Amino acid sequence: MTNTESRAVGRTGDASTAENTSAVREGSVRYDEVDAVVDTATTAAEAFRALDQQQVDAIVEAMVRAGIRAAAELAAVAIEETGFGVFEDKVVKNYVATEFLYDYLKDKKSVGVIEEDLERSIVRVAEPIGVVLAITPVTNPTSTVLYKAIVAAKTRNAVIFRPSPFAVRSCERTVEILRAAAEAAGMPPGALQVIPDAAHEVTHYLFKHPGVDFIWVTGGQKIVSLANAAGKPALGVGPGNAPIYLHRTADIKGAVVDILISKTFDASVICPAEQTCIIDDEIYEATVAEFERMGAHLLTDEEAEALADFAFGCSDKVNLEALGQQAPELAARAGFTVDKSVKVLLAPLPSDLDRLAAHPLVQEKLMPVLGLVRARDVQHGIDAAVLVTEHGGLGHTSAIYAQDQAVIDAYALAVRTGRILVNAPTAVGALGGIYNNLTPTFSLGCGTWGGSSTTENVNYMQLLNIKTVSHRRTPPQWFRVPSNTFFNAGALERDVACTSVVVITDALSEQRGVVDELRRHLRAEHIKVFSEVEPEPDEATIRRGVALLEQFPPDLLVAIGGGSVIDAAKAIRLFYEHPEKELEELALPFLDPRKRMADYPQDPHQLRLVAIPTTAGTGSEVSPAAVLTVAGRKETLVDYSLVPDMAVVDPLLTMSMPRTLTVDTGVDALTHALEAAASIFASPYTDAFCVQAARLIFEALPRVYDDPNDLSARTDMSNAATLAGLAFSNAFVGTNHALAHAVGARFGIAHGRVNGVFLPHTLRYNASLPTKFMPAPGYSAYVAPDKYAQLGRIVFGGREPEESRRRLFQGVEDLLRRLGVPRTLQEIEVREDEFLAALPELAMTAFQDLSNRTNPRMPLISELTDLLRAGYYGEGHDAD
């Protein structure tokens, strides 16, 4: 996917290019050892061929699960070994190479008969190739290995990896993880191997080896050419030099955010990233201004010349020191200084096509440098895009931002690239499955134009040059609620038909008499109480609850208590009805809830669940989530099959709540409303619930605090908590919850209390200019500050957005102070030495928390660390 190695080979001596730049002593290459590896792979391939579809899919599933679990570890290994790119983005790439790939592959047939056309009487039968030699690059040293290994397993091929010598450890660790999982699931031993020897002769020898059946190259033009000349089937992918044309009808704000997401993704070492942005004259100045507003730096002529000389001063070879560095560091290495907040360097390029063709920065730039060309009209813009592709990008990727279909059609007809993305970023979009329905891949064919056998995101249609015009995909959203919700005082007086009931609760609720109150309203012959639920219930508690249901099978399950009780009941019903499911399987992390690996049962429930909250905060009575503690960590089960069948929200049950619990749960409800409002999954439906919930909380929570017996205020708080629950059940939450989950579990702090510690900091964090944007197809511009302003205007007033936003943030501060909520972890008496010792682990735990997936800005590890410090020390250490 990158020509880094071929252009920098004089500097790096990268063996994966197979360029014989130095003499190797006769006999120094141990060919017998190479032969032994190929022989082992051949034997494994024969054994692999005997497996059926079910066995193959079990192997693939095991590899994907292992890859998902190791996504962060492998990203860290890649950064440490290569020094290229951005850790957080490499984690995302590893998810794409596993989770997104599996979502595409899981239902595909790859063994035996895979297609039958009865009308034409055609049967298609799949057979494996045999032994595949896979060349992998330094720029994507783990994601490419994950992708190729999983695809090879799906097609029953043995694969031998030849990594870049600068990424051997990354490849070996990835293969080690996958091999252990795959062989445990039945993969023949030897089907997954690495040959790390850097000698060029080894690559030459393997290219000609009779035991190698297929060569799959991700690298530069030279090694692709050598592979094609090897005399056996080969698939090579060429370099990218993606042009982007912004027509005058483009959505400027949306396009700029897309391009910044894409061009900063992994510090732009991914080959489909935008390289030259061609902008219509009518919108040129406005676009450049928007780039600068969102964190780009426009280079002066002197800076652009210094950068070009630093990066490309050595003839046609790129300077390895320029690759994969973030903008401030790249500028420093080139001899000038930019602000540390700068995301991308903008280099103005000539509009004259002859001068443009001669400019050194018209070529592929695997660094956060974006060329700018002013187009005088549509034809000039298209001609410039065609020129850019002819400088190292033929067959690869291009994009256009426009609302005029005729212009889109003209662009698609003229530009010779395999992928033409419409109103979508190229680096993330070309990989497929995120912004569009392209096949998820890390092997982007460039067709005959780029020396490849296909233009596809590698799939079975490899004998055609197919140009794919892919429009941006905005996935449909949803709003799902329980079928019945009863609320206000007296709601408990329900007549629910039942014979045998099991009540799930906790010891404190039972002592407070709520179970006795419930008994008076249950017309059942048999009632059994399970009161062993503790805060943040663990798996052992769930299993004991399941055992009780198995001993006394009920026809109604009632959860009465706080969020932990209701969460426990959800899990107890789940594992009672489906004992074959494993908690670890269902808690598998994911990047996109629609593509996750976890397989929740979707058949109708046999046991009805009624949720009756005795607190006003968690919203668990209407939510699809259940938070459990597993091995000291908070794990979240999320699926709409967990939602109770009925919610009974009776404020009378909250009257005896102690003040501390009232405050903690109330702040939790407020956090739900504020985070759901800014979520990338927010919708007009959830916004309505967020606004009403926040309005009620700001007004009612102080009243309950002053007078616990104020039934009217208790009623408002109960309704507000459920409204906020309905909002986050559909929009989900964000980074505040990720931080609260990590810190709360580590130091045993009540969830609502720790939410209150971080809430002022995360509000300012999300309202400020993001360092990195969260890829979100339905989130066309960065609107979190506007959402806060809208909510603030409704609740607190204010004429201008900035004033309304300020009033909202001040309202949060005032409420927390009014309620006596601790403002720092120091106030909660977390010891400083313990906090600092745990800080790296807390940041990583928060980063991996599912709540981050819908936060409006992508949190970096460093930013989470700053937020954690702000939560401990206070506002003076806040990270804006």
Image (tube, helix red, strand yellow):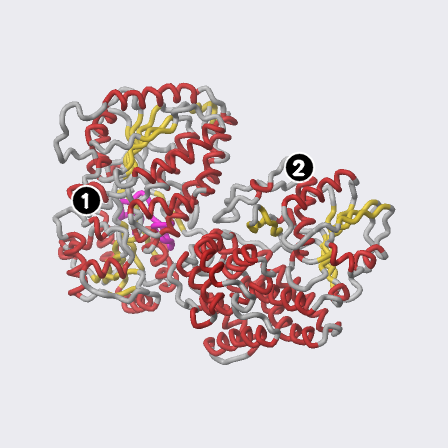
Residue 510: percent from left, percent from top: 77, 56
Is any part of residue 644 visible from this angle? yes
Does 199 sit above or below residue 880?
above
Circle 1: residue type: Ala
Circle 2: residue type: Pro
The numbered dot on residue 415 is none
Magenta region includes residue 118: no
The residue sitting at 35% across, 35% down in the picture is 172
Q: Is residue 472 left or right of residue 19?
A: right
Closer to the camera, 177 or 876?
Answer: 876
CA separation, marks 2 and 1? 56 Å
Does 62 sit above or below residue 705?
above
Specify start and end residues of the magenta stretch as a single range. 410-428
> What is the crowding at mark 1: few (fewer than 14 residues within 10 Å), some, or many (at least 20)?
many
Is any part of residue 375 visible from this angle? no
Q: Which residue is mark 2?
A: 579
Residue 26: percent from left, percent from top: 14, 24
| Mark 2 or mark 1, earlier in chain | 1
Does 373 sit above or below residue 159?
below
Does 471 sit above or below residue 868?
above
Question: Which element type, helix, strand or loop, lies under badge 1?
Answer: helix
Residue 155: percent from left, percent from top: 42, 28
The image quarter in which residue 543 lies? top right
Q: Which residue is mark 1?
A: 8
